[in-house]
């Protein structure tokens, strides 16, 4: 499989960009300004990288008209170069294209329905009553549980597990190792012994969702765990039972969302953020990396917790001081009182004088 | 598969609950007070939800006798409604029931022993010397390594890996993607290069244990990693080599337990808790979410670390101040000394006056 | 499979250690000083465990010559007992040895190349153009994507996923559930909707690397994600797209490295460390557990963040005080000014007197 080649003119046309330079210049790939060679297209999205523009060897660059003024080489001028790069990136993707049809080694239950345009990979197992939509690709070694549904255009990497009664919308991408519909962590404590609560809800996932490698989304205890449209979940994220994630919210890797918590629309969680259970996060919230969220958020905006990294020796002092902080606060208050007493005594003397 | 239907009378009898209302009312499911319809049973366990009782449309409610006084609808009266809900939940679980027998595509080593009542799923691989007990269900795509043992009544979801020499007790549930017996992280450093230490111990897991999706439990370096009876581990937990977890301890998702650490019985770790290696946690400890545990705990009780979430702008100030904390503490001490000097000077003056 | 037996003399010869005691004493295993029996060899590496030497029942002990002076039993004297233990550990490993050849159920693409000395496990899938080197073992249920390469001597546990265009060096060990080459988390935001960026880079992994269970290493957005020689990654680590990890760096479990970050050589990250994206960590850095790293590190040394665990009631006070810290700092400054004023006023009076 050789890399595809396009001309700069073809790419300009595809994007609706203004072409500056040789329309017939062949472009065989994409690369950063720093790494691109003469046959590659690059882009300038982050102003920090403007310095690389002068010395780039790229065959052409995606630029805003404003940035293009300072650049003499071939260019495609467009309002949002990063979005343009996103659009072109798919042209150069060497990800293997699935072939329609059921691999001879795949096991599809007699009463499961697989669209004829779908691709079912080697050793995949599709259980009773499952529905696989048009153009769906189910990778090798995937397991699709009873009555689960994958909407049209979905793509499951090899080795994805869907338990039973998992409903997935259209054009959903799920990376390898993800587990959707595992049994939520629910137990009733009876004299110190944990008694299991069957998790009889399912999982409902909207359209255009991405789910990262080894991410887990548990089924609901009673009703379904809900993931909205356009939600993007990175790798190794944990979504507990009964969680609801609003449309177009994105989470970076290693976030953990505890049971029954509801997250609004258009939120962004950086990596390693943890949310306690049974809270609510409103729309438009941004949470910085590794923040511990123990209460609801009712106002859009950015939120953080944690302490800054220090050299370990200094950090040990900070840590010790934090443990003394309550004592320090009391001593500070004492000082204020005592100083006020001294000052007022002094004032009195002055007045007396 | 249609949902099962029970009468309220049948459910009362099964629980030993006092029935108040129509014994022949059909109940086809469970739901929260908020979401239940006329054919569903609900429950009141958390006093916070008492407000939903007045307006619930549930066909009947599991209640304590005390709470039932304020409720006019059909009810099942019982001392512990949450435990009763846990017990009934299994009646309404649509989780597919495994069929006894070895799937024709499963590969079972000639010298492995599989009880005739066990179920071995499609494409499962059972290696030499393994023992699969009565009533065990091994899901599709599972791998059971050499000489590993699964006690009676165990249930492995699809796609679980047990390495060799993993001993699992009775009635153990393991969710998809879990890896038990992976090689612990052990290396000796030789002039900057890490030399691997073979992990020659195994893993021993007690009875009635639950292991969540994508959780990993490493084999011991020399002796076995040990998980006690009744331990409940949520998803994406990491248990390193030589760890010991006491009976009936529960951990929520994303906890990480470093090598050779020992955790007592009846402990609870909330999500994202991390324990350093080679420490000991006594029985009856509760650790709140995302706590960093760097030393042993010798007294039962609740423990925490970390800072509270703040709006990011305020947080930046807090973070900067924490780095100045050692300096602040010294200045506070200075102030105390100086004020004491002033005060004693002032006192002297007063005395003089 | 019975445990192998060696004589003490054989072990001494293999290590180049000085034998003290019976050369023909049979040794059938390794154990800690505390747990070893008469047929087992133990070792003293950590001075903390010297106290166990007096009462050990071990058949022999690996010791430095200095430590051997205080021990009367049979011993193997060597400069680095821990390294010696690492070397001997492989002799007693009961890990099943793979047999050369392709399992009849494995699916190998017609144009994939598998060395005749390699072992391909049951139900493994090897895609078009893949190259499997000499002596490589690919476990059951593994998936090796198109054009991916596994260098000689590699060992993949059952159920590992390599996507397409993943290049792996020699003698690389990958534990079960690991996912290499998953699609990096890249999206361009278009009016609140995330547009996917195809991840057209691959992953390049050096020689002698270890990758833990359920660890994920994403493919690059444009160029490859790079893992250097001798890197050791524990379980459930997340390496995002475009990350570069320098030679001989080790990370304990649950670390998360955000996109485009570069980590130097010979670094050590303890468990649960998180690194923000687009930063650089120099060679020789040690980061303690659960540290949040939000900026580049340019000096070798140890770094930390976070607060120390406290009993929850005390912690609540600390947390509240941290939120007041900016206010406290201002009040402290006020006090200093006021006290200076008082003192100078006092001085003035004295001068006046």
Image (tube, coloured by chain):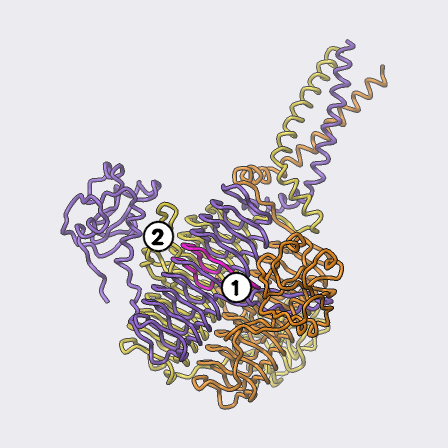
Chain colours: A yellow, B purple, C orange
Of residues B147 and B12, the one drawn nearer to the viewer in this rendering: B147
C150 relative to B322, above or below: below
C115 relative to A161, above or below: below
| Disc 1: CA contacts within 10 A as few (<14), some (14-19) or many (>=20) | many
- The residue at which mark 1 appears reads as B218
SS for callout 2? strand
Residue A286, given in percent of the width and then of the height, sits at 52, 53
Q: The N terminus of chain A is located in which quarter?
A: bottom right
Residue B177, given in percent of the width and then of the height, sits at 45, 67
Q: Are marks 2 and 1 in contact (CB under 8 Å)?
A: no
Which of the chains bears the disc numbered 2?
A
Image-based side of B83 in relation to C59, left or right:
left
Image-based side of C129 in relation to A99, left or right:
right
Which label is found at residue A195? 2
Of residues B221 and C264, the one drawn nearer to the viewer in this rendering: B221
- Tell me if residue C178 can be seen: yes
Main structural element of the magenta stretch: helix, strand or loop?
Answer: loop
Q: The C terminus of chain A is located in which quarter?
A: top right
Which of the chains bears the disc numbered 1?
B
C63 relative to A330, above or below: below
Q: Residue furthest top?
A: B353
Specify start and end residues of the magenta stretch as a single range. Answer: B208-236
| Total marks in image | 2
């Amino acid at each position: 499989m050789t890399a595809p080649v396009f001309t700069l003119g073809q790419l300009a046309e595809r994007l609706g960009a203004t072409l500056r330079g040789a329309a017939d210049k062949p472009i065989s790939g994409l690369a950063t300004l720093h790494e691109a060679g003469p046959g590659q297209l690059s882009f300038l999205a982050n102003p920090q990288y403007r310095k690389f523009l002068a010395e780039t060897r790229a065959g052409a660059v995606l630029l805003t008209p404003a940035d293009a003024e300072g650049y003499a080489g071939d260019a495609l001028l467009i309002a949002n170069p990063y979005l343009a790069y996103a659009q072109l990136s798919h042209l150069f993707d060497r990800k293997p294209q699935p072939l329609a049809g059921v691999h001879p080694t795949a096991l599809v239950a007699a009463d499961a329905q697989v669209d004829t345009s779908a691709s079912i990979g080697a050793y995949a197992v599709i259980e009773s009553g499952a529905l696989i939509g048009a153009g769906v690709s189910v990778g090798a070694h995937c397991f699709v549980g009873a009555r689960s549904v994958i909407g049209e255009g979905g793509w499951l990497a090899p080795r994805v597990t869907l338990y039973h009664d998992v409903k997935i919308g259209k054009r959903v991408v799920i990376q390898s190792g993800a587990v959707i519909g595992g049994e939520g962590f629910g137990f009733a404590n009876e004299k110190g012994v944990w008694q299991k609560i069957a998790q009889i809800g399912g999982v409902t996932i909207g359209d255009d969702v991405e789910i990262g490698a080894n991410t887990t989304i548990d089924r609901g205890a009673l009703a379904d765990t809900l993931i909205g449209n356009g939600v993007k979940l990175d790798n190794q994220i944990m979504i507990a039972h009964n969680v609801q994630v609003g449309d177009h919210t994105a989470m970076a890797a290693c976030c953990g969302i505890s049971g029954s918590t509801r997250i609004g629309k258009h939120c962004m969680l950086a990596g390693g953020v943890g949310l306690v259970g049974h809270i609510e996060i409103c729309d438009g919230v941004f949470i910085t990396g590794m923040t511990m969220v123990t209460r609801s958020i009712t106002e859009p905006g950015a939120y953080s917790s944690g302490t800054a990294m220090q050299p370990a020796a200094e950090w040990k002092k900070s840590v010790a001081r934090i443990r003394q902080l309550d004592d320090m606060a009391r001593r500070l208050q004492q000082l204020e009182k005592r100083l006020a007493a001294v000052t007022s005594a002094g004032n009195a003397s002055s007045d007396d004088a």
